[in-house]
């Protein structure tokens, strides 16, 4: 199995009783499932959502059954490059939707400290494309990274290595920029001693305050919700954690 996108989020929230936590998590899964179905046009995929209390930590995964399925999904957009970039945008969108829905359902919209992040195979491939475009990596290095990332399966998918190689070698690179030598924006001479003089200077001599004592750990819950294919019913498992 190969992840298409992995969406991580963190919400600062209070505690919930088991019944409410389960109900909110299932609501989140069903809302996110609808968003993924409307956005990612793969023929089939699996969904995984893990939500954990203390505060709320969540991981959502959209998973293709194989690298072949992932590759066909990418190729359906006309080329490897356009497919990776399009699906990458879709991945960012479903992560944002999961994050937005979670804040609404768990009622944390106005609380600071909420974060989200998109990772997964598509984002990994997008990152390699961008590094080659910026001349930070050669096509050969990018291809070696892809083979290492997907392992032996990369060789078992007909046309995958050939298509990837052709795409990276034909990728248009960003032109090299002229090196900056300070001629156009020289630093005033009188500023330099001040910078050197203040380097490493402490802004305060007060000792750092001691952190407050941690409260005794309480029981929290972790819920795992899965759907093994687009047409299957969801499966819910909830467990107690410290």
Image: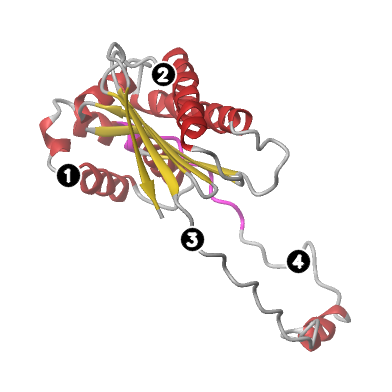
Residue named by callout 1: 151
How many labels, in total?
4
Q: In the rendered image, which quarter is residue 180 located in?
A: bottom right
Left or right: 242 with respect to 24?
Answer: left
Q: Is residue 173 magenta?
A: yes
Q: Secondary structure at mark 3?
A: loop
Q: Which mark is residue 40?
A: 2
Mark 1 or mark 4: which comes first in sequence? 1
Residue toward you, 203 or 160: 203
Q: Closer to the camera: disc 3 or disc 4?
A: 3
Q: What range of the chain is rendered magenta?
A: 167-178
Mark 1 or mark 3: which comes first in sequence? 1
Residue plotted at (20% across, 34% down): 161
Residue plotted at (68% across, 67% down): 181
Name above or below for residue 150 compared with residue 20.
Answer: below
Q: Label 4: few (<14), some or many (≥20) within 10 Å?
A: few
Residue toward you, 107 or 43: 107
Q: Which mark is residue 183?
A: 4
CA distance for labels 1 and 2: 25 Å
Name the spot of residue 224 as percent of width and height, x first: 35, 35
Predominant secondary structure, magenta span: loop
Name the spot of residue 67 as percent of width and height, x first: 22, 30
Q: Which quarter of the rendered picture does the N terminus lie within? A: top left
């Amino acid at each position: 199995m190969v992840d298409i996108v992995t969406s991580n989020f963190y919400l600062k929230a209070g505690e919930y009783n088991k019944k409410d936590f389960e109900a909110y998590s299932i609501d989140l899964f069903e809302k996110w499932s609808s968003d993924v179905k409307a956005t990612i046009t793969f023929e089939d995929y699996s969904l995984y959502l893990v939500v954990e209390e203390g505060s709320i930590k969540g991981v959502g995964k959209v998973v293709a059954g194989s690298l072949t399925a992932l590759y066909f999904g990418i190729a359906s957009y006309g080329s490897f490059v356009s497919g990776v970039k399009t699906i990458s945008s879709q991945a960012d969108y479903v992560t944002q939707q999961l994050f937005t829905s979670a804040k609404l359902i768990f009622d944390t919209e106005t609380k600071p400290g909420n974060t989200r992040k998109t990772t997964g195979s598509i984002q990994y491939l997008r990152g390699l494309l961008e590094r080659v475009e910026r001349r930070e990596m050669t096509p050969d290095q990018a291809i070696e990274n892809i083979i290492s990332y997907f392992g032996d399966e990369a060789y078992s998918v007909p046309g995958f290595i050939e298509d990837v190689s052709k795409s990276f070698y034909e990728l248009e690179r960003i032109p090299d920029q002229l090196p900056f030598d300070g001629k156009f924006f020289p630093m005033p001479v009188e500023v330099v001693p001040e910078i050197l003089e203040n380097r490493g200077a402490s802004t305060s001599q007060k000792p750092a305050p001691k952190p407050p004592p941690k409260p005794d750990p309480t029981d929290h819950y972790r819920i795992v919700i899965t759907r093994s294919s687009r047409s299957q019913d969801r499966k819910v498992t909830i467990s107690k954690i410290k």
